[in-house]
Image (cartoon, rainbow, N blue to C red):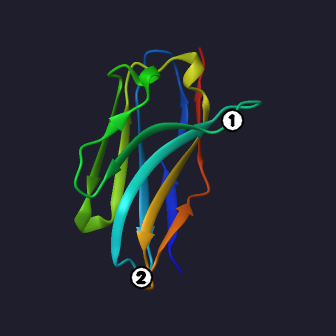
Amino acid sequence: QVQLVESGGGLVQPGGSLKLSCAASGRIVRVARVSWYRQAPGNQRELVATMTDVDDANYADFVNGRFTMSRDISKNTVYLQMNSLKLEDTAVYYCNSVLNSYGYYDNYWGQGTQVTVSS
């Protein structure tokens, strides 16, 4: 059974930084895409950043150069470095992956990690 586990969320002041991690475990044959989403209270879940196994990361317009998505293939882990955080970045951040586990591709979600930006 594939699992995605996020970590690194917390409380930070405006202008601060956080680094989120998403570690995948289980039987993974190939990862086609990994993405970070977020969902604020009362809002729909929205895409933050996404990357495929061959492309560099692409970001939502609201990121505006503040976030960087990276990966460590050897650890089956992706990261989201978030700098210059704003109040409106407060949300639960989710890791999502489309990967091949038992010969077919499926969509997996982590449980989410809370990011709160507050003074």
Whole-percent x and y of residue 33? Answer: 38, 57
* Secondary structure beneath label 2: loop
Tell me what residue is drawn at x 50 percent, y 15 percent: 14
Residue 44: image tag: 1
Tell me what residue is drawn at x 74 percent, y 31 percent: 41
- Position of residue 108 relative to residue 105, above or below, is above
- Furthest toward the right, the residue is 42
Q: Is residue 90 visible?
A: yes
Amino acid tagged 1: Gln
Quarter residue 19 falls in: top left
Residue 98: image tag: none
Graded by Cα atoms within 10 Å as few (under 14), some (14 to 19) or many (20 or more), the crowding at tag 1 reads: few
Amino acid tagged 2: Arg
**From the viewer's perspective, is 14 left or right of 56?**
right
- Position of residue 108 relative to residue 80, above or below, is below
Q: Which residue is mark 2?
A: 27
Q: Quadrant of the C terminus?
A: top right
Tell which of 109 and 14 is nearer to you: 109
